[in-house]
Amino acid sequence: MKARAHILIVDDEQVVRLSHLRSLATADFEATAVGNGSEALSLMECHPYDVVFLDLRMPDMDGIAVLKTIKHRWPESEVVIITGYPTIDTAKEAVRLGAYHYLVKPVSPIDVVKAANEALRHKHWALHKVQPGNDGSDPRERRDWTHGLPTQFAGIGGTS
């Protein structure tokens, strides 16, 4: 049985948290929601999440501070910013700090699920890419190439 992805929703608006929880549950994700950045970081201490949906404007700790902490302490977690107050500056800062995506509220249920799937695909790709043996150093994983073509095609067209 395949393990379900764990997603954390961090937003000070209860209606937003509940909406995202419903959307993710229909797609068979295991999701948890909290109302502020401090709660989010406490939960991350106990159990790092695969994907974090993070609001930028929250009363106790802004989303940029939470993003910095998550990417510093749990760099393998993907963060999707979802904000009702988008600016070019916050988008650039979020991406510079390692956010995977930056979405503007309101976000449809389909877009929430799509963002979760894309962030998970990126996470799995990144983790797979850096595993030992996936760098081409294992001869069994390499193809033999000649003249820029796989060996079985190298002689076609007069190049050999």
Image: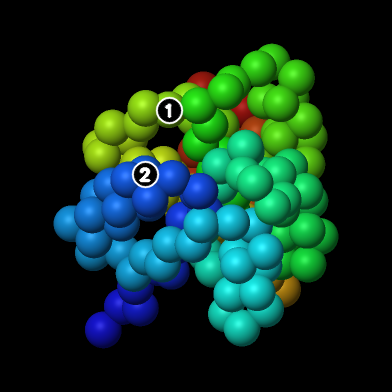
In the image shown, does 4 or 2 lie closer to the viewer?
4
In the image, 153 versus 113, the foreground residue is 113
- Contact (CB < 8 A) between labels 2 and 1? yes
Callout 1 environment at 10 Å: few (<14), some (14 to 19), or many (20+)? few
In front here: 141 or 79? 79
Task: For marks 2 and 1, give the CA distance.
Answer: 9 Å
Q: List x then y, in percent, for residue 28.
A: 23, 64
Residue type (three-letter) at the residue carrying disc 2: Val
Label located before the other in sequence (2 or 1): 2
Which residue does the image show at 23% across and 61% down from the upper left?
25
Residue in the picture at 60% in, 64% down: 40
Q: Residue furthest front?
A: 59
Q: In x, y percent, where is residue 71?
A: 74, 56
Quadrant where the C terminus is found in the figure: top right
Residue 4, image quadrant:
bottom left
Residue 36 visible in the shown view: yes
Q: Secondary structure at mark 2?
A: helix
Q: In terms of secondary structure, where does tag 1 sit?
A: loop
Quarter in which the N terminus is drawn: bottom left
Residue 83 location, x and y as percent?
53, 31
Q: Residues within 10 Å of mark 2 (few under 14, many from 20)?
A: some
Q: Position of residue 119 (x, y in %)?
A: 49, 48
Where 94 falls versus 124 (above or below)?
above
Q: How is the image coloured?
A: rainbow
**Left or right relative to 14: residue 144:** right
Q: Which residue is mark 2?
A: 16
Q: Is residue 120 above or below residue 55?
A: below
| Residue tagged 1 | 105
The residue under label 1 is which amino acid type?
Answer: Lys
